[in-house]
Image (cartoon, grey):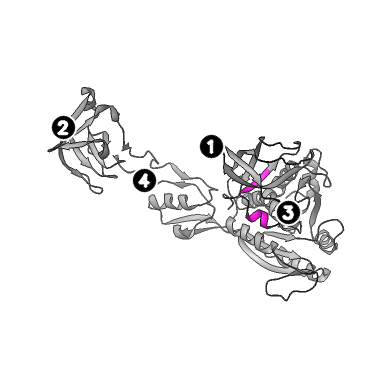
């Protein structure tokens, strides 16, 4: 395990007091590299949502297990299409989903078939029922509305037996759970949850239920961080609020260092604040204090206390969320053994001017909409102060203005990092 100094020596131009967002992420890739957690457990599929697959899942069957109809309609021999014009086919039976229909269908004949029903040998095309009309025991349709092989699902076209269905490191969402169930797999090996401890710092911070007092504010950071951790599937250890007291901070840090994989704090790391938190981090661990060229966010602490990875986030609510999204989230996913999962970005036309200084990455809260031509467009949610948490509630994502970019004009293209895929 490399020390922070050794990591810093590997990075060109590293300056903890003047880091770009890209340099900060590069550092964290060394501090919290992609991991293969040592512990794995076998869980029922129904209990495995958001967990990380610990080994490649190989399909024990082909999906689908047989050629079948993708439509309610009529199955027939595609050779009949060579006649051209309107086709007349005699219907000789009905195939339902379930056991295969056992009769024979000759050319010039067809079989009424339901979605999912096994395609009898020799039949390779299905005409949807809505494109046909009946005339006694015959169906009539134009040969121009269907091509050979249409509306037939082939055996194994989704997965072939022996193919990797889910690679190690896959995070199990609802679709992945459905896929496992479709393969008849009742349990899945997943990594043990990453154990993440969190506490807020500051004598002025109130927990919910505390009586209001002059100069104090209720702790919002704890709940936003816990919400983001929950979406990642982490095991959370809520340590509440720790006042600015050196001995209490010492006990809190020692407690988490021995029991958690990661500890996250907020507050107490900015210039001019009470330095008890910073001093205790330095005393107990290998910690660097950064000033990142970003807005909102800027101050951040990273390092280790023992084997526990430490993230010290700013105190302002929006800055906490932005630094978590930009830096902590990808680091946690790597530590969890997950494959790379960047949040999706969309390009959108800017609906208003955005002031921007080159030399820092800025994250503006944005609300997306569709223009008349179908293009995405984005406007800010109003006041962008780092304490305005309501603006995050109203946003669809963050407008990411790159380090070297300048002012954005109305109509310019910008990149928007979406919130919907978080966790």
| Residue 320 visible here | yes
Q: Few, some or many C-alpha atoms within 10 Å of disc 3 (few <14, some 14-19, many ≥20)?
A: many
Q: Nearer the viewer, mark 4 or mark 1?
A: 1
Question: Marks 1 and 3, Cα distance to the nearest angstrom?
Answer: 32 Å
Is 391 contained in the magenta span? Answer: yes
- Which quarter of the figure has residue 46? bottom left
Q: Secondary structure at mark 1?
A: loop
> In this figure, which residue is indicated by the disc labeled 4?
61
- Image coordinates for residue 90, horizontal then vertical, percent: 14, 35
Instruction: Give the residue furthest to the right.
Output: 272
Q: Mark 1 or 3 closer to N-term?
A: 3
Q: Nearer the viewer, mark 3 or mark 2?
A: 3
Q: Which mark is residue 319?
A: 3
Question: Marks 3 and 2, Cα distance to the nearest angstrom?
Answer: 71 Å
Q: Secondary structure at mark 2?
A: loop
**Residue at point 71%, 46% (across, down):** 363
Q: With 87 as the anchor, is 329 left or right in this view?
A: right
> In this figure, which residue is indicated by the disc labeled 1?
374
Q: Mark 4 or 2 closer to N-term?
A: 4
Q: Mark 3 or 2 closer to N-term?
A: 2
Q: Mark 4 or 1 closer to N-term?
A: 4
Q: With 212 as the anchor, is 176 left or right in this view?
A: left
**Residue at point 22%, 32% (across, down):** 141
Q: Nearer the viewer, mark 3 or mark 4?
A: 3
Q: Is residue 145 above or below residue 337?
A: above
Q: With 279 as the anchor, is 81 left or right in this view?
A: left
């Amino acid at each position: 395990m490399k020390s922070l100094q050794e990591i810093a020596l590997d990075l060109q131009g590293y300056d903890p007091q003047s880091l770009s967002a890209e340099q900060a992420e590069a550092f964290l890739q060394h501090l919290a590299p992609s991991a293969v957690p040592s512990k794995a457990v076998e869980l029922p599929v129904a209990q495995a949502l958001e967990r990380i697959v610990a080994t490649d899942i190989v399909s024990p069957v082909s999906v689908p297990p047989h050629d079948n109809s993708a439509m309610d309609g009529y199955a027939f021999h595609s050779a009949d299409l060579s006649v051209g014009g309107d086709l007349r086919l005699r219907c000789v039976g009905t195939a339902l989903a379930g056991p295969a229909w056992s009769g024979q269908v000759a050319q010039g004949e067809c079989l009424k078939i339901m979605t999912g029903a096994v395609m009898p040998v020799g039949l390779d095309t299905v005409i949807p029922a809505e494109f046909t009309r009946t005339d006694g025991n015959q169906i009539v349709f134009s040969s121009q509305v269907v091509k050979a092989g249409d509306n037939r699902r082939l055996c194994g076209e989704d997965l072939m037996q022996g193919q990797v269905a889910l690679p190690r490191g896959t995070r199990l969402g609802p679709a992945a759970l459905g896929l496992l169930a479709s393969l008849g797999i009742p349990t899945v090996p997943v990594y043990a949850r990453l154990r993440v401890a969190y506490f807020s710092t500051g004598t002025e911070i109130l927990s919910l239920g505390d009586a209001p007092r002059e100069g104090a504010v209720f702790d919002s950071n704890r709940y936003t961080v816990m919400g983001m951790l929950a979406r990642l599937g982490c095991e959370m250890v809520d340590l509440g609020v720790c006042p600015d007291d050196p001995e209490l901070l010492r006990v809190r840090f020692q407690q988490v260092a021995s029991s958690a994989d990661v500890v996250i704090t907020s507050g107490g790391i900015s210039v001019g604040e009470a330095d008890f938190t910073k001093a205790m981090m330095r005393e107990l661990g290998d910690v660097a204090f950064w000033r990142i060229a970003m807005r909102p966010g800027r101050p951040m602490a990273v390092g280790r206390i023992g084997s526990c990875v430490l993230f010290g986030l700013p105190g302002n609510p929006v800055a906490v969320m932005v630094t978590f999204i930009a830096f902590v989230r990808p680091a946690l996913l790597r530590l969890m053994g997950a494959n790379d999962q960047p949040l999706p970005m969309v390009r959108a036309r800017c609906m208003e001017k955005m002031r921007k200084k080159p030399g820092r990455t800025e994250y503006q809260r944005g609300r997306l909409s569709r223009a008349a031509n179908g293009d995405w467009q984005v406007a800010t949610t109003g006041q962008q102060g780092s304490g305005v948490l309501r603006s995050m509630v109203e946003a669809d994502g963050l407008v990411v203005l790159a380090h070297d970019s300048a002012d954005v004009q109305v109509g310019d293209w910008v990149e928007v990092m979406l919130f919907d895929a978080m966790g």
